[in-house]
């Protein structure tokens, strides 16, 4: 997708709202309490639905893009031809019906996610930028300690470097970590500092 000043401005506005929204996700949605268990657990769907709600509140009704959750691309005539028809990204910020209006694609995983899940997300995010004309891809990791996040990042880099047919380009994916409720997600680098 061509990087125009309009896309840059819209992306920056969205990212300000994204940071505000992540800071508003409360503990019960990040660390889901379960009756009969001593410790809460990570439930990606619960987190994503609350993040979607907080993003809608933060972006308001005057943003020129639509926020979609788990938009099924199975019947999309263009994306199906680009091998993206079997995908359902966690969140899309786009203008439905117009390929030039693809702004941001987001995949979300808890810090406890494992290799296969990570590889699939990284492949899809790369494909949505390279083939699907999305301006930016974001991989949002939530929860855990710094050590937990470092382990996640290491697993992600290993998956990206695995030889295979899946194309993964970490250079087109921005990595964010939402460590705890009440704090905004922060951008992290793929390589440890």
Image: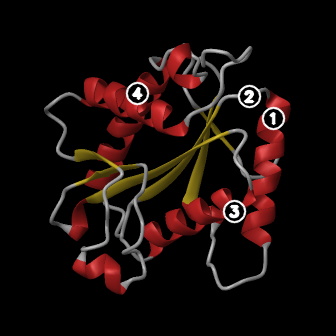
What sort of colour scheme is used for the picture? secondary structure
Q: Answer whether labels 1 and 3 touch (C-beta < 8 Å).
A: no
Q: Is residue 16 visible?
A: no
N-terminal of the pair, mark 3 or mark 4, is 4
At horizontal 81% and vertical 35% (from top left) the residue drawn is 148
| Residue carrying label 2 | 144
Above or below — where is 180 with respect to 15? above
Residue 109 is labelled as none
Marks 2 and 1, Cα distance to the nearest angstrom? 5 Å
Q: Is residue 50 left or right of residue 168?
A: left
Mark 1, residues whose alpha carbon is within 10 Å: few (<14), some, or many (≥20)? some
N-terminal of the pair, mark 2 or mark 4, is 4
Q: Is residue 173 left or right of residue 15?
A: right
Q: Give the quarter of the image for residue 183.
A: top right
N-terminal of the pair, mark 3 or mark 2, is 3
Mark 3, residues whose alpha carbon is within 10 Å: few (<14), some, or many (≥20)? few
Q: Give the quarter of the image for residue 156.
A: bottom right
Residue 116 is labelled as 3
Mark 2, residues whose alpha carbon is within 10 Å: few (<14), some, or many (≥20)? some
Please, what secondary structure does the residue beneath circle 4 have? helix
Marks 1 and 4, Cα distance to the nearest angstrom? 23 Å
At horizontal 24% and vertical 74% (from top left) the residue drawn is 75
At horizontal 77% and vertical 46% (from top left) the residue drawn is 152
| Residue carrying label 4 | 50
Compare residues 35 and 84 and report the one nearer the observer.
Answer: 35
Q: Where's the N terminus, which quadrant? A: bottom left
Q: Where's the C terminus, which quadrant? A: top right
Marks 1 and 3, Cα distance to the nearest angstrom? 17 Å
| Residue carrying label 1 | 148
Marks 2 and 4, Cα distance to the nearest angstrom? 18 Å
Q: Answer whether labels 2 and 1 touch (C-beta < 8 Å).
A: yes
């Amino acid at each position: 997708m061509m990087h125009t000043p309009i896309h840059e401005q819209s992306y920056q506005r969205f990212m300000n709202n994204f940071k505000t929204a992540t800071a508003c996700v409360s503990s019960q949605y990040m660390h889901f309490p379960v009756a009969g268990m001593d410790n809460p657990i990570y439930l990606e769907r619960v987190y994503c639905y609350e993040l979607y709600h907080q993003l809608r509140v933060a972006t308001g009704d005057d943003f020129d893009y639509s926020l979609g959750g788990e938009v099924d691309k199975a019947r999309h005539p263009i994306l199906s031809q680009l091998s993206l028809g079997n995908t359902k990204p966690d969140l899309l910020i786009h203008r439905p019906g117009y390929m030039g209006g693809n702004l941001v694609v987001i995949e979300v995983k808890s810090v406890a996610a494992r290799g296969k899940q990570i590889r699939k997300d990284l492949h899809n995010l790369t494909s949505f930028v390279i083939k699907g004309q999305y301006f930016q891809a974001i991989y949002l990791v939530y929860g855990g300690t710094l050590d937990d996040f470092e382990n996640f990042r290491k697993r992600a880099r290993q998956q990206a470097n695995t030889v295979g047919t899946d194309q993964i380009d970490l250079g087109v994916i921005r990595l964010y970590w939402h460590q705890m409720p009440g704090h905004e997600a922060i951008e992290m680098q793929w390589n440890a500092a």
